[in-house]
Each structure stands twice: as structure tokens, then as C-alpha cells.
Image (tube, helix red, strand yellow):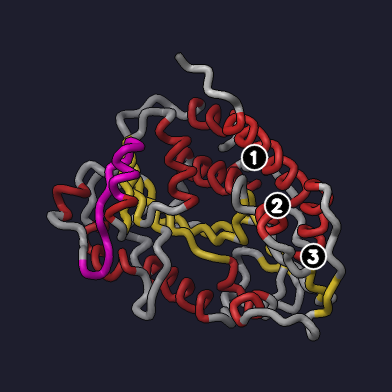
Amino acid sequence: MTPDSLQHSLSCSPTQSKKTLLCFGYGYVAETLSETLRLKDWTIIGTTTDSDKAEEMRQNGIKPIIFDHNHPISAPFETLKDITHILISIPPNERGDLVYDLHREDIVDMKNLEWMGYLSTTGIYGNRDGTWVSETSEPAPTSRRGSLRHMAEKQWQSLEDECPLHIFRLSGIYGPGRSALNSVRNYEPKRIDKPGHAFNRIHIADIVQTLVASINQPKPSEVYNLADDAPVPSHEVIAYACTILGVNVPPLTSFEDADLAPIVKSFYKDNKRVRNSKIKSDLGVKLFYPNYKTGLDACYEAEKELFELMESPDTAE
């Protein structure tokens, strides 16, 4: 579910020997990146904690590995010796990054490793009262999630001279099937008014194109923010989703009066605007979806095509 030009960006890479990507954590980003890389005949290996998902991955051409704290990679030298690229997206715990905890020495010893990406979060910047942050801004996490990601970043950065580490700090991820459109379809989301507050977001296709750009031109030890050009209040996004779907726009509710679950309320604790200029200047990224309107329009079109395909009569004989 990524633009055709993203596939072309891989075809522009120099002809190289067989590449193998190991995804520690085969989630949304890893799966979408893998779909693109497999078009260029990459081998994909992914970890999961679930045996049912492992079987689903196997059926889709992905080599699965059951991996968690109690199940480290067995025979790591043999398993890792042909890996050329690693993507890590497993959420950290109180000890930091699980892969670092279990296999940091094995990764440092890998002879064929060309690129390693760690997916972090812009939450490591904490609250900046609506001002702008860049990769040079000092991390100051105010949430547990941000603090754990910052710990994991520092763990891997301690080894950046020994492995080709790249850190990607992601804003809120959305894409087809995972956007404000789905929130509006499934329930009536609250439109919260907290003056001066903005959320940062990034379309899944722009995450993938940034990762591909980094794979094509590795710059170990670099840190990149991933966000679109237009941080805005969430109520604007919900209103636009309602407009696309032709439903009534819910009224605004003040943040003070809103009855929000603790997890939702925690997202309003941090207020910052994330600069994305580095991925443009260093990696040549031109965002497919520079704001939520272009992104939601694309999500709607992709979902509409899928719905029409599902509703078409089966004409196979």
C-alpha cells in the first residue's frame, strides 16, 4: 500500500548481491517495509511472540522466528551470519531494548551487516509547550514510553562505533485502515479543544520511503525525525475525516471538561512541533503526504478500492 514511486526508488539502487532484512518485531512498519523490499527480491525474516502469527508470516513468504525474553535467537552466529540489514521496533521494557539485552554482542560480531535501523519515538523530546524541536534538541521525555525509548536509544548509541546504527524518531503513525477515518467509522471520537496544542503525525508510506532512502545511502550514527509538514490539533483531523465520509462533525469539547481515559489524556501532556527538514536535506525525501489532508485523502481512496474489490462478485470459474 505504498506509492509506485517508492518501488522505483529501490530500482534506482546499484545492482547488489542478495539482501536479507531481519525485523525484530514484525509489526505495521516492518510489514509495510518488507512488502516493498520483497519486490526487489529481498529475503525477509521477522520475529514474533505468537505462533499463529508465525504461521501466517510463513504463508506470506516471511521466515518467522519466535523471539521474546525467554526465547532468544538460538545459534545466533548461524542465524545472523547472512543478515545484511536489521530493523528493530520491539517496544522497550524497564531494562531497555530487548534485542540489545539479549544479542548486542552477536550483532556487533556480524560481518555482513550493512545497515541497522532502530525505530524510536518523538516522545523522547517531551513537552516543549508547542515550540519546535529538531534532532539537535536535547531529549527530555516526560512519559514512561518516551523515557524507555530514550534509554533504548542510549543503549544502542553506546555501540554506534561498532554497528551501522540509524535512529528514526517516529511521530504518530497512520495509513490505510489505521487513521481517523476508521475512528469515525467505528465510533464517534471526541473532538478535544486544548488551545495551542498540536499533534505530529506521519503516513506509513513516508516512513517506508525514509527507511528505503536510508538503506540506499547509509549514514551510521545519524538520527532522523519522521513527521509531516503540518502538526495540527487532533480535532482538525477528525473534522476532515468526517467531511470525507459525509457524516456530521462532532462538537468541540474543552480538554478540561472531556472525560478521557488516562492513556488518551497522557497524549495531551506533551505539546511540541517536530521539524522534518533533515530527512529532506540528508536523504532527499520528498513527502508523499505532507499534511493530514493529503494523507487522509489517500487513505480513503485506498480503502475505497479495497471495499470495491471485496464487494465485487467472484467471477472465477
User: What is the number of the mark on residue 303?
Assistant: 1
Q: Is residue 5 visible?
A: no
Rendered residue at 36%/33% (across/down):
42
Residue 3 position (above or below residue 196): above
Q: Residues within 10 Å of mark 2 (few under 14, many from 20)?
A: many
Q: In this figure, which residue is indicated by the disc labeled 2? A: 181
Residue 169, picture quadrant: bottom right
User: What is the number of the mark on residue 235?
Assistant: 3
Q: In the rendered structure, are the residues bearing label 2 and label 1 in contact, judged by CB atoms less than 8 Å apart?
A: yes
**Residue interval drawn in magenta:** 54-70
Q: Amino acid at mark 3?
A: His
Residue 134, picture quadrant: bottom right
Rendered residue at 58%/48% (across/down):
204
Q: Nearer the viewer, mark 2 or mark 3?
A: 2
Rendered residue at 76%/72% (across/down):
131
Which type of secondary structure does the marked residue at label 1 adopt? helix
Of labels 1 and 3, earlier in sequence is 3
Which percent across, then down, holds residue 264?
Answer: 64, 75
Which percent across, then down, holds residue 311?
Answer: 61, 32
Of labels 2 and 1, earlier in sequence is 2
Which percent across, then down, holds residue 138?
Answer: 59, 75
Of labels 2 and 3, earlier in sequence is 2
Q: CA distance from mark 1 to mark 3?
A: 22 Å
Which type of secondary structure does the marked residue at label 3 adopt? helix
Farthest residue, direction bottom: 256
Farthest residue, direction top: 317
